[in-house]
Image (cartoon, rainbow, N blue to C red):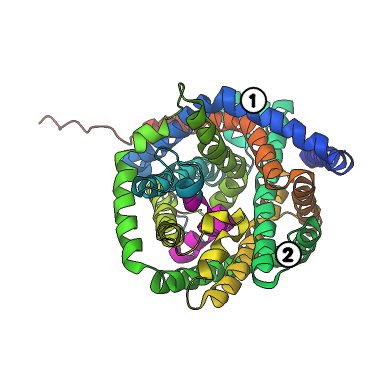
Amino acid sequence: MKKEMIVLYISVAILALLVIVGVVLPDSLENITANIQAFITDVFGWYYLILVSILTLVCLYLMLSPLGRLKLGKPDDKPEFSRVTWIAMLFSAGMGIGLVFWGSAEPISHYALSSPTAQEGTDQGILDAMRYTYFHWGIHAWAIYGIVALVLAYFNFRHGERGLISATLKPILGDKVNGVTGKSIDVLAVLATVFGVATTLGFGAVQINGGLSYLFGIPVSIGAQFIIIAIVTVLFMLSAYTGLKKGIKILSNANMGLAGVLFLIMFLVGPTLFILNLFTHSIGTYVQNLVSMSFRIAPLNEDIRGWINSWTIFYWAWWIAWSPFVGIFIARVSRGRTIREFVFAVLFIPSVVGFLWFSTFGGTAIMLEHEGIANISSLATEEALFGVFSQFPLGFVASIIAMILVGTFFITSADSGTYVLGMMTTNGSHSPGNKIMLVWGIMLSTISLVLLYSGGLQALQNTMIVAALPFSIIMGLMTVSLIKALYKEARELGIGKIKQPKVK
């Protein structure tokens, strides 16, 4: 067994065992993951909230401090991609399918089905629904991605370390990163990545199936989702074979174009003034309540604590599980950027775009229900967006564009995922072989199908939360490692020192 391939072999063996259990004993897999998930959210909820808040503060500090002048690369390195393409690539990898899937479904759920604070169906419920949706998709989420990407880019491009999670811990662990400890860390990162990406691919397949069901009466079933995933697997493997500068770059720009068209259709034919007012007000309440929301755990109210477990803790775990994948990918395309530019772009640009998206699609869904025009909350989660479109001109066209957009986001997420997993399992190579990427493409699709087969969306969520916990510890260590290395370099370069006036 080649030493540099051991992470691949161990990871594939563990995942193959999970696939066998999922196929042979689907109910057992769902029950086991549900029990572990319940334990983690009950016992470690406080830990997730504190960890994610610390990561957010670290990102903000690095952006504002003199350390922000340091470049992710050598002093003369130039960015590989234009700023527009760079932002499109990180956005497509980071949240594509999720925005489309939850764009209407999350705000309407908070408003009509289970409010985070207020009585369902009230005016205050509208405001609270948007505030918490912003919270779940705002700077905290992007700080999780950003810190992992920042650590990887800094060590890989500035210090020439391999593009592996384990290599970033060298300031703490020393030569242990080259041994069993380092390989174990990389295996955990691979597993977290697989479950995070597979969960998102499952959401994408379910939403495409939901759109076909709502528009054409095709039943929502594991059979239909199998066909959808099989078709998209072929497409994203073709894209992966074309390489980072062709397939992923072209599709990322196409995603942003399609998302822009879909947004403009809904913004213009929907309640435009209501959307703008809701966006503006929600920005203010989001900023005003950011600290209290960040640490809200409801120790004396079981119902509210259940809501926090189901939404906030779920999201923090989802972003953590996705962070190795998104982090490695964003790091790969961010060479030549300064830390300040990187953190600002990663934290704030996608957050504001997401806020506009949720105000438009979620706000419209809430308006329709609040005024008694349509009962969007009664639809299945994956059909909510299509239910909103059906109430407006160009609704059928918008629905078709939405399904195409989910498909292209599906392709870029899986495409990027196979590339990143190839890197992680070939000792950090920036050009993993096509055979390796084929293995990971098939594995991602298979895991996604097995989780859907064993328990649908709930099984996806359960497994992802379980996978996130061990990697969250590694994220904390990566952050410490980065700070230690940055301050060492700052001392060497004299960054941040106050110059003493010369005495004549």
Query: Label 1 amino acid?
Result: Phe
Q: Quadrant of the C terminus?
A: top left
Q: Name the residue under label 2.
A: 232
**Count of numbered labels shown in the rendering:** 2
For numbered disc 2, what is the local secondary structure? Answer: helix
Residue found at x 65% / y 45%: 196
Q: Is the magenta region chiefly helix, strand or loop?
A: helix
Q: Where is residue 149 in the image (x, y as percent from the top left)?
A: 53, 45
Q: How far apart are marks 1 and 2 (CA)?
A: 35 Å
Q: Name the residue under label 1.
A: 39
Q: Residue 322 falls in which quadrant of the image?
A: top right
For numbered disc 1, what is the local secondary structure? Answer: helix
Q: In which quarter of the image is the N terminus?
A: top right
What crowding class fits label 1: few (fewer than 14 Cα within 10 Å), some (14-19), or many (20 or more)? few
**Position of residue 216 in the picture relative to residue 79 (left or right):** right
Is residue 86 on the magenta stretch?
yes
Residue 163 in view in this figure: yes
Tell which residue pokes out farthest to the front in this image.
372
Query: Label 2 amino acid?
Result: Val
Residue found at x 45% / y 48%: 111
**Position of residue 179 in the picture relative to residue 118 (left or right):** right
Mark before the other along the chain sequence, 1 or 2: 1
Point out the stretch of residues depicted in magenta.
Answer: 82-108
